[in-house]
Image (spheres, grey):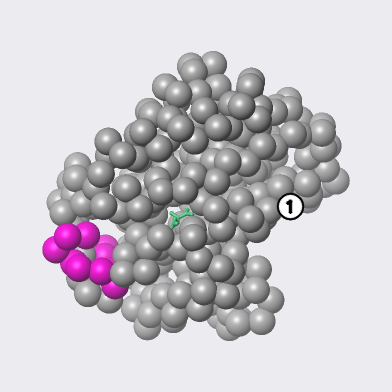
Amino acid sequence: MAVGLFDSGLGGLTVYDAVSKRLPDVPLVYFGDNAHAPYGVRDADDVYNLTTAAVERMWAAGCDLIILACNTASAAALRRMQESWIPKDKRVLGVFVPLIEALTERSWGDNSPPREVEVKHVALFATPATVASRAFQRELAFRAIGVDVEAQACGGVVDAIEDGDMILAEALVRSHVDALKRKMPEPQAAILGCTHYPIMHDAFQAALGADVNVYSQANLVADSLADYLERHPKMIGHGTDNLFLTTGDPRKVSDRATQFLRRQISFQAA
Ligand code: DGL
């Protein structure tokens, strides 16, 4: 038994990296659906079908607790999964809420009515499917009032990262930040609302300028998982080794993962 981390591809490794450093004794199973990445250009039914298939595979690998380390799946599929599909003894959690709690200065599970917060102008960078879902704005509205969110769908960035073409990824980041700034010239905060984007953190920060606070999810999700496991210690599992599964080509995916995390990562066929 282990904690599962799911992503459409390599992006969830940013969350894996933070979780494995924060919780070095917790066994993890990482699942990258690289054969079907990117999810961000798919419709909600497609994302739901792919995500549920991956989650079933991770249940088979012994994961009772799964984090969808993928905003697109969290935005387009998680609510539907939680409403009717997930059995009582399993938990599937998303990555939006920890981020929004950080942005709105709330501690975990603070369900008090929405209130005014410090930050007023927020840029959201995410995949086309996440932007179309408006899930971020919906979750934010439960907690904060008077926050202006401008969303920028960042087409192409995930494909470039999955292909290892970092020059293209950087050029795309610059052009998406330019497009955002035409709509919102002075954002106070920027949300990297796709787990692939922290790999391009420096490019986002450089294009946005040093005074924009760039939020990325990895550490926030790791902290909130640590908190959750403290309250639900049975979910920790008793495995000892981490396992990396992919629907893609294990050799290619291992090479890219090793390059991104700067340590040896070996994927197996899912
Ligand atoms: N890394 C994912 C996310 O957080 C998915 C990106 C994609 O497959 O398009 O949205």
Figure label count: 1
Q: Answer left or right for 35 relative to 101.
A: left
Q: Is residue 222 in view from this perspective?
A: no
* Magenta segment boundaries in residue numbering: 239-253
Residue 248 sits inside the magenta stretch? yes
Q: Position of residue 11 (x, y in %)?
A: 37, 52
Point out the image quarter for the N terminus.
bottom left
Rendered-image quadrant of the C terminus: bottom left
Task: Estimate the x, y position of residue 79 in percent, counting from the top left.
Answer: 65, 68
Q: Which residue is mark 1?
A: 138
Placement of 68 over or under 264, stated as above or below: below
Q: Is residue 200 magenta?
A: no
Q: Residue at x 66, y 49 (%)?
A: 136
Left or right of 258: which side holds 202? right
> Could you tell me which residue is drawn at 25 percent across and 44 percent down?
165
Question: Ligand 1 is found in which quarter of the picture?
Answer: bottom left
Q: Callout 1: 10 Å neighbours few (<14), some, many (20+)?
A: few
Q: Between 211 and 144, which is closer to the camera in this rendering?
A: 211
**Considering depth in this image, is 175 or 190 the residue closer to the camera?**
175
Dividing the picture into quadrants, the one containing residue 228 is bottom right
The quarter holding residue 34 reads: bottom left
